Amino acid sequence: MIALLVIDMQNAYFEAPELAAQQEQLVASCNRLLEAFKANGHKALMVGTEHERDKSTWTLNMLDDDQGFVFRGTEQAQAVPGLALDGLPQLNKTRDSAFVGTNLLSRLRNWGADEVVLAGVSTHNCIAQTGADAFAHNIRVTYAKDAMASEDSQDAADMLRILSTSYRQPVQSIEEILARLTR
């Protein structure tokens, strides 16, 4: 089974102008994947970041800068408008990787998923870290190239090149992914 992980499609990340310009297209692409996974009997999960104001969940750079981000219950932490979340299970994380400090691995094992398709933001941070950790757990990864975005396109391209080459994690279009779902 292949599972879809839609990562950090939250208002906070689209405050960056580079991502705001891509929001409408990215929501449409993620929704297309979500519909196809559901229609073909595959699982999907919305993965989001949420932090506590008391600093107990803050990352090292947040602590160093004394600057929190994406606080639980705020508008920043909400999913972007238009994302098809109806009935979609959700997973909250506090680190770049969706595996660190969560039950993601258990969920994937319970579903019988041996591969994940990654979509959302940001390619060079949370998506890349989740992909690298999936590899460490012997879970295959495919990156949905037209359903991901980043504030820095060069960093994203460099990271995908490294992951694709070193970990044999393919970068595919939505069309290529959809063709695999219906086999």
Image (tube, rainbow, N blue to C red):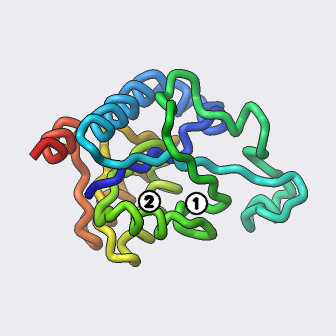
Q: Is residue 101 visible?
A: yes
* 155 or 102: nearer the viewer: 102
Q: Is residue 125 above or below residue 13?
A: below
Say whether residue 52 is left or right of residue 80. Answer: right
* Dot placed on the residue nearer the N-terminal end, 1 or 2: 1
The crowd level at tag 2 (other Cα within 10 Å; few <14, some 14-19, many 20+) is many
Q: What residue sits 52% from the left and 41% below the top? A: 151
Q: Is residue 152 visible?
A: no
* 178 or 130: nearer the viewer: 178
Q: Quadrant of residue 71?
A: top right
Q: What residue sits 63% from the left and 62% below the top? A: 95
Q: What residue sits 76% from the left and 53% below the top? A: 51
Residue 128 has which mark? 2
Q: Position of residue 117 (x, y in %)?
A: 33, 52
The secondary element bearing badge 1 is classed as loop
Q: Position of residue 92 (x, y in %)?
A: 63, 53
Q: Position of residue 162 (x, y in %)?
A: 32, 65
* 161 or 59: nearer the viewer: 59
Instruction: Tell me the residue that label 1 is attached to.
Output: 96
Q: Position of residue 29 (x, y in %)?
A: 35, 30
Contact (Cβ within 8 Å) of mark 1 with mark 2: yes
The secondary element bearing badge 2 is classed as helix
Q: Amino acid at mark 2?
A: Ala
Gap between marks 1 and 2, in whole Å? 8 Å
Q: Amino acid at mark 1?
A: Asp
Q: What residue sits 31% from the left and 45% below the top? A: 144
Q: Quadrant of the N terminus?
A: bottom left
Instruction: Count up the numbered dots.
Output: 2
Say whether residue 41 is left or right of residue 22. Answer: left
Residue 21 has which mark? none
